Image: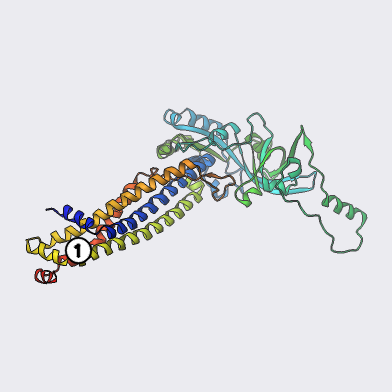
């Protein structure tokens, strides 16, 4: 009779204890797989949002990432149209590209001077048609709806601002925004009468007029310094004010068409861009595409560098690291529960079967055979328990995905579907089962070693 048969019979001998041990192992596997699937789903969703916003790769002047916003003219890419055409028409890259588009980072002062209000802004100029394509990227096939953009390809003067910036500029009534806070009127601490001209100024400040409209649309003035230091001012029509998930971003965000941004930064001088964004159809093409783009850039002789989204958005890796740490901590706790559950079950089995162990030893079973029986028993408990927990996790994950539970992640204003993708990482299920079986074998090793070291005479006397 082999060790597997003996181990299985021993499990069935005390079914209540075996069921409790299997339940502990199953709950641990269930928790690890369910939380792991949620982490996988969250990371895949975050990856999709990151690629939609910033692409896979960006081509920039060397030093732009560190100093570009302080000196946009020095670290800008001139004659960028030729490089964009080269990338789009390259024999290797063309079938792998989703979008190649230039962008220009801008910052300055936004003013609603009809109401006497102004505030600093930061944003970027984009090609609206390209941005619409980028926001529809779904290379992981998650089925996420495309992110809407209010920018219009045929509107060269229309842009979007953050809801907080609209509030700072006093645009809420003109844009019919209902969830804006109203600025309280100024109060004069000193009761002494003010001069006529100062009183009139205070009255005007306390009751700002509505912003002037052009062609029925609300407009604001944007002021930025050119590379030479001279100020440039352009007027932008506000198409929409969108709430951002981060307050600091909501108070400064502006998105506008690239030509309008170039006019604001460069004026009548030669226009340029901050970066050329490359979005690929498939994530697996990132490294080969980067190598090919570097070859094209080097051939042009320009001091450019190709950066991936990990460098452009370091927060992505920080969030993944945070989820990874939480997952490892939970997996460690569940592993400890499984370890002690199996160890306790096997230890009790050894204590109850001392006479049986002596009989097996008297029949010629060697010490290694005794160890093998109890280790196999632990392995069977780990196998059955982990498989049961895995099946329960898959069933619950399927139900959660169908029900459509939603949550609002940090940095977002709209709820998203709470997904549990237990099959998103092929290693999750296999590693959970394999590690659980390994832990069960390890936890059964010490009791099995104690059983194997029993003296035959003493064991038979115990019977």
Q: How is the image coloured?
A: rainbow
Q: Quadrant of residue 442?
A: bottom left
Q: Quadrant of the C terminus?
A: bottom left
Give residue 362's position: percent from left, percent from top: 7, 64
Left or right of 258 in this view: 441: left
Q: Is residue 455 visible?
A: yes
Give residue 414's position: percent from left, percent from top: 58, 44
Left or right of 31 in this view: 145: right
Q: Is residue 359 above or below residue 327?
A: below
* Residue drawn at point x = 26 percent, y = 62 percent: 345
In-front residue for pair 294/125 = 125
* Residue drawn at point x = 40 percent, y = 59 percent: 329
| Image mark count | 1
Left or right of 324 in this view: 267: right
Q: Is residue 19 above or below residue 304?
A: below
Question: Callout 1: few (<14), some (14-19), or many (20+) C-alpha neighbours within 10 Å?
Answer: many
Q: Is residue 307 visible?
A: no
Left or right of 125 in this view: 15: left
Q: Secondary structure at mark 1?
A: helix
In-front residue for pair 436/201 = 436
Instruction: Give the residue at mark 1.
Output: 448
In-front residue for pair 416/141 = 416
Give residue 168's position: percent from left, percent from top: 72, 49
* Residue drawn at point x = 38 percent, y = 56 percent: 331
Q: Quadrant of residue 14?
A: bottom left
Give residue 395's position: percent from left, percent from top: 39, 45
């Amino acid at each position: 009779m082999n060790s597997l048969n003996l181990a299985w019979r021993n499990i069935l001998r005390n079914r209540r204890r075996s069921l409790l041990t299997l339940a502990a192992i199953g709950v641990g596997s269930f928790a690890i797989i369910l939380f792991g699937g949620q982490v996988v789903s969250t990371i895949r969703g975050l990856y999709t949002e990151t690629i939609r916003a910033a692409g896979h790769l960006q081509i920039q002047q060397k030093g732009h990432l560190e100093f570009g916003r302080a000196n946009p003219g020095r670290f800008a890419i001139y004659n960028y149209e030729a490089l964009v055409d080269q990338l789009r028409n390259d024999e290797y890259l063309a079938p792998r590209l989703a979008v190649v588009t230039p962008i220009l980072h801008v910052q300055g002062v936004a003013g609603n001077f009809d109401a006497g209000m102004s505030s600093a802004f930061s944003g970027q100029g984009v090609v609206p048609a390209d941005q619409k394509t980028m926001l529809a990227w779904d290379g992981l096939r998650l089925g996420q709806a495309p992110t809407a953009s209010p920018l219009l390809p045929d509107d060269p003067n229309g842009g979007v601002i953050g809801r907080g910036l609209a509030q700072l500029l006093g645009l809420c009534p003109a844009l019919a925004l209902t969830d804006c806070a109203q600025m309280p009127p100024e109060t004069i601490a000193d009761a002494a009468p003010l001069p006529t001209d100062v009183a009139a100024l205070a009255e005007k400040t306390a009751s700002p007029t509505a912003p002037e409209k052009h062609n029925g649309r609300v407009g604001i003035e944007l002021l930025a310094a050119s590379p030479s230091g001279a100020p440039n001012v352009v007027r932008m029509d506000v198409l929409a004010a969108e709430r951002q998930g981060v307050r600091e971003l909501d108070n400064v965000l502006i998105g506008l068409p690239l030509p309008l941004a170039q006019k604001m930064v460069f004026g009548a001088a030669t226009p340029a861009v901050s970066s050329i964004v490359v979005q690929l159809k498939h994530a697996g093409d990132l490294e080969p595409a980067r190598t090919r783009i570097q070859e094209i850039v080097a051939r042009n002789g320009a001091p450019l560098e190709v950066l991936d989204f990990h460098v452009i958005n370091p927060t992505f890796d920080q969030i993944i690291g945070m989820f990874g740490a939480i997952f490892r901590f939970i997996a460690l706790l569940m592993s400890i529960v499984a370890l002690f559950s199996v160890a306790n079950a096997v230890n009790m089995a050894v204590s109850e079967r001392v006479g049986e162990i002596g009989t097996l030893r008297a029949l010629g079973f060697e010490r290694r055979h005794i160890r093998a029986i109890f280790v196999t028993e632990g392995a069977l408990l780990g196998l059955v328990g982990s498989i049961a927990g895995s099946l329960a996790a898959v069933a619950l994950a399927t139900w959660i995905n169908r029900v459509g539970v939603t949550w609002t992640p940090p940095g977002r204003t709209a709820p998203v579907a709470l997904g549990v993708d237990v099959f998103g990482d092929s290693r999750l299920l296999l590693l959970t089962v394999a590690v659980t079986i390994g832990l069960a074998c390890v936890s059964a090793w010490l009791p099995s070693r104690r059983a194997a070291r029993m003296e035959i005479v003493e064991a038979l006397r115990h019977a």
